[in-house]
Image: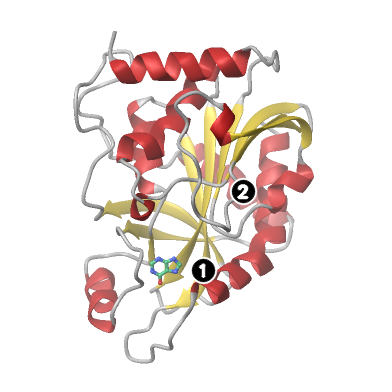
Amino acid sequence: MNLLLQQITAATDYLQSLSFGQPRVGVVLGTGLGELVNHIRIAHSIPYQQIPHFPESTVESHKGHLIFGYIGDTPIVAMQGRFHYYEGYTMQQITFPVRVMKALGVQQLLLSNAAGGMNPAYKKGDLILLNDHINMQPENPLRGLNSPAFGPRFPDMSCPYDPQLGTKLQAVAAAQGGALQSGVYVSVMGPNLETRAEYRFLRMIGADLVGMSTVPEVIVANQLQLPCAAVSVVTDECDPDNLHPVSIEEIIAVAGMADKKLSSIFAGVIAGL
Ligand code: HPA
C-alpha cells in the first residue's frame, strides 16, 4: 500500500477509536484565529503529538489540538493550529490532516487565515471570502506517487472554492451585519513579509491578498473532491507606495480583534450544514 495511505489509515483508526462518530464538517483555523473553539461543545481535544503521523505544531500562536465536537447539531473536527511550509514541514505533512479529515467522513471544509491586504479597498480587520487563488509556493502537495484512492492525478482547479459554501458564508455574514468582500489570495513561502516591489508584483499578477497558508490544503481538498471555502482576515494593509513596518505581534493582534466576528460567521454556517 502507498505509504501515505498507510499513515492516513493509522491516524484515522486512532481517531475513530475515540468513538466520536463521523464529523461532517472540517475546520482549519489560521494564525490568531482560535475563537471558534468557544462555539464548540467539545467532546475530545487531542494534542497533535498523540495522533500517529501528525506533524507537531511549532508556532507559538498555534495551539496544536484536533478538536471533535458539535456546533448546533453538526458534528465537526477542527484544527486549532495549522502547519506552514516556512516551519520546515513538507507539503505532504501540511496537508496530512485534510486527508485524515476526509477519511473520517468530513463532507465540507472551512479554512481561515491571516493575510496581507493588497487591494486598496480592504482595511485592517476586514473579512474577505476567497474566490480564487494563485499558488506561488515552491512545492506542491500532490507531487509524488498518487494513489487512485486520493483522486485524480491532475485535479481540475477551475473552481477551487465551493460557490454554495461561499453563498452560505455571505448570507450568514450579511445577517450578522457585515457583508464579506471577496478576492484572490496568493500563497507565498514566507516567513519574511514582502518588499514593496514584491507587493507591487503580486498585485499586478491579480492577487488581492497575500499569505503563507491555505492553498496547499485547498489543492488537496480539491483532489479529494471535498468542497471547501476560506476566509481571510486582513491583518495589514500592503500599499507599496505607503508601506509601514509590521510585526507578527501586530498581525496576531489584528487577527484577534476580527476573530469574534469570523467565528460567529463560521459557527452560523456550520450549525446549518
Ligand atoms: N504577507 C504575507 N503573509 C501575511 C501578511 C503579509 O503581508 N500578512 C499576514 N500574513
Task: Identify the residue position indicated by label 1 in the image.
Answer: 234
Of residue 14 and residue 158, the one placed in the foreground of this image is 14
Q: Where is residue 123 drawn, in percent x and y?
A: 53, 77
Image side of residue 115 versus residue 25, left or right: left
Task: Identify the residue position indicated by label 2 in the image.
Answer: 63
Q: Quadrant of the N terminus?
A: top left
> Along the polypeptide, which appears first: circle 2 or circle 1?
2
Residue at image point 47% right, 37% down? 228
Q: Is residue 191 visible?
A: yes
Establish if 231 lies above or below 110: below
Q: Is residue 160 visible?
A: no
Image quadrant of ligand 1 equals bottom left
Q: How is the model colour-coded? A: secondary structure
**Helix, strand or loop under label 2:** loop
User: So how many labels did they put on this image?
Assistant: 2
Establish if 88 lies above or below 118: above
**CA distance separating discs 2 and 1:** 21 Å
Q: Residues within 10 Å of mark 1 (few under 14, many from 20)?
A: many
Of residue 189 and residue 223, the one placed in the foreground of this image is 189
Disc 1 residue type (three-letter): Val
Image side of residue 33 versus residue 86, left or right: right
Residue at image point 57% right, 60% down? 180
Q: Where is residue 223 drawn, in percent x and y?
A: 32, 28
Name which quarter of the figure residue 168 lies in: top right
Q: Residues within 10 Å of mark 2 (few under 14, many from 20)?
A: some
Disc 2 residue type (three-letter): Lys
Residue at image point 37% right, 13% down? 6
Report the residue that reaches farthest toward the bottom. 242
Name which quarter of the figure residue 3 lies in: top left
